[in-house]
Amino acid sequence: MDSFSRDNNRGFDWGAFIAGILMVVVAFLLIRNPEKGLHAFVLVFGIVSILQGLVWLASYSRFRQFFSRSWVTLVSGILDIVVGILFLCSYDIGGLTIAYLFAIWFFVDSIVGISFSWHLKDFSTGYFIFNLIMNILSLIIAVVLILNPVLAALSLIWLVAFWLLVFGINEIITAWMHR
């Protein structure tokens, strides 16, 4: 056996296998209990927001030395902490906020997609029309999500669950491929 074959035969990748199994399990839990998944998202976003606020506040004294508008770090830190506390105190407000942010993200991305599709006209009329239609459909979906935040929240949970399922299966297969 040459050194190349020996180096590539590393054995079963237990880390990828365990991560893949956990991702698949979490995906099924999210699909089965989307409301608990949304609560978990709100909890994570609330904690991350508070931590980010504390980082901004701790950075204020450093920024003050070389940045004349260092007060922005204070304002940002305070806002992050307030948002984090709000999310932790009210899962409904946090879930609604996440749902609207998700829908607005789709909306903005659709508008940008429509505006950028016009340059495709010079390259291919067929692709331009296809791209424009797809972005208009995306815009319609975004408007529906904005008008129905519950659907937006569920869509977010389902997309994350689907991603976890696909990525988890890929990790499990990767674990087997490494042996």
Image (cartoon, rainbow, N blue to C red):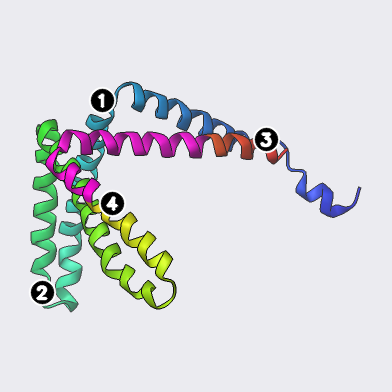
Q: Name the residue under label 2.
A: 69
Which residue is at the front of the view, 29 or 46? 29
**Residues drawn in magenta:** 140-168
**Corner quadrant of residue 147:** top left
Q: Mark 3 points at which residue?
A: 176
Q: What element carries label 4?
A: helix
Label number found at residue 36: 1
- Residue 9 appears at what percent x and percent y? 77, 44
**Corner quadrant of residue 41:** top left
Q: Name the residue under label 4.
A: 138
Amino acid bearing label 1: Lys
Tell me which residue sits at (56%, 38%) in the image.
171
Name the side, left or right, on which 95 lies relative to 114: left
- Mark 4 or mark 2: whose residue is earlier in sequence: 2
Tell me which residue sits at (38%, 34%) in the image.
161
Q: Does the magenta stretch include residue 149?
A: yes
